[in-house]
Amino acid sequence: MTDPAAANPGSRPPPAVAIRKLTTQLGSKRIFDGIDLEVPRGSVTAIMGPSGTGKTTLLRHLTGQLAFDSGRVTVLGEDIGQLHHEPLYRLRRRMGMLFQHGALLTDLTVFDNVAFPLRENTDLPEPLIRTLVLLKLQSVGLRGAAGLMPAELSGGMARRVALARAIALDPELMLYDEPFVGLDPIAVAAVVELIITLNRTLGVTSLVVAHEIEHLRRVADRLVVLADGGIIADGPFDQVQADPSPMVQQFLRGLSDGPVPFHYPAAPLTDELGIGGAT
Amino acid sequence: MTALKDLFSSLLDFIQRLGAMGSFLMRILRVLPGSLRRFDMHLRQLWFIGAMSLTIIIISGLFVGLVLGLQFYSALNQFGASGALGTLTALSLYRELSPVVAALLFSGRAGTAITAEIGLMRSTQQIEAMEMMAVDPIRHVVAPRFLAATIALPLLCVVFSALAIMGAHWSAVLWLGLDNGTYWSSMVGSVDLVDDLLAGVFKALVFGVLVALIAAYQGYHAKPTGEGVAYATTRTVIHSAIAILAFDFVLTAFMM
């Protein structure tokens, strides 16, 4: 992984993301209960956790799409809680997000989808936009698909086009929401390669939310496990996998029962069926 | 007591939604001038929302006119007043029928399309993706559709009137034998451009704003699921119909 600190020795660059005492309540459910997390610039951090523990919510806090109850979230040096409208949009131009299903604009071609953020956010002349779009598409291997509509793409291709679009403005921070879901092994390999390349060649800081530990191990240098409103494990992969906590072990080894129970809370089965030997 | 409480809370809910809609309208109006920079988007929406509604408006207008010709002729003929058929047809169309019927048809054709389209964009995360690309979806998605619907409905209302007058001419003059000259001269003699025709077009303009606002609001705030979009589409038709009829009453009372 690239190390920006090496470029300017002496001064440690501020983290790309800094979260302090973040608390979030959605309806009656407490999602985060005062978590702290720091993501250094140029790193790739994997975020895992059982469903419903707020992985996507965390990403939405970082983009300012969802307000949090208390705490402080700093992204690329900006305090998200203080930003509205124009300053927030300015910050978002410095970040890219890969959505779970790509979220391509269905009424635009592949080319126009990748050109969209460039046309909307810059005053670049059209010939230059064309060059940039073709280069981005080339980097995901889909220059030949520039004229296709999103409906004509396979799931893996759509994800790659979405990635090309997300990096169109050369973001400093990339957020990946379940980038491997529903892809065949070849497409997964392509996405893994792209995440690694982006980080190594451009030093893009990345946060990857996913469940596939074997893929995450290849792209990320650090694993953060969320559960029960907090961070239950954080560190290099080997260290986290050796973590003795039963919750971490249950999750990483994929055991159906453990601290996260297999059964949704309910009265004892014998009571419910009326066949109990109750006195 | 509970019934009263329910009534009160649903009233409160209604007022709250009106407020939310008002602020949604303000958001649209605020970004509308900026969105005009992308004129091609507006033109495309005007085509989809306006031109694509022409078929239903033309066919319905023709049939409404045909029926008016038949009904008015048989009613007026009893009093030997069939000479007033042109006047009656034109006034009822310009003042009431064209704006209201065209708006109701428009909410079914274009309003539902707007809701479904925006709702689907929401459920497939396209709206979110735009926000992430620092593009305001209100400016890019909602404003062009809103403006297109507002422009299209008054025009469609005029088309509806024209076709209905032709329809009435067809049934009353060509079938039932009303004098051609009487039909047209009674119309020309008693219709006022401002009080009748433009008043109706103004109504259509107001209905256009209503349908566009309701449809866009429902789509934009639809639950991001298939079921949510389906519900939102249904609500667009119901809310539009009620709003059109209620506003028609208010506008008519003011214009009298």
Image (cartoon, coloured by chain):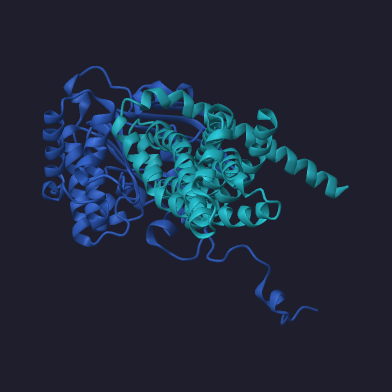
Chain colours: A blue, B cyan
Locate residue A110, reporting x and y percent: 21, 46
Locate residue B241, reporting x and y percent: 60, 47
Front residue of this view, candidates B180 and B28: B180
Q: Residue at x 19, y 42 (%)?
A: A111
Q: Residue at x 54, y 62 (%)?
A: A261
Query: On the picture, is A6 further left or further right than A72?
Result: left
Q: How many marks?
A: 0
Front residue of this view, candidates B77 and B134: B77
Q: Quadrant location of the C terminus of chain A?
A: bottom right
Locate residue A178, reporting x and y percent: 34, 50
One can see residue A70 in this view: no
Q: Quadrant of residue A89?
A: top left
Front residue of this view, candidates A185 and B217: B217
Residue extending furthest toward the right: B1
Q: Quadrant location of the N terminus of chain A?
A: top left
Query: On the picture, is A106 further left or further right than B211?
Result: left
* Rendered position, A183 above or below B198: below
Query: On the picture, is B229 further left or further right than A209?
Result: right
* Rendered position, A178 above or below B130: below
Query: On the picture, is B47 further left or further right than A275?
Result: left
Front residue of this view, candidates A175 and A268: A175
Locate residue B221, reporting x and y percent: 52, 43
Q: Residue at x 45, y 35 (%)?
A: B146
* Rendered position, A108 above or below B206: below
One can see residue A148 in this view: yes
Q: Quadrant of residue A168?
A: top left
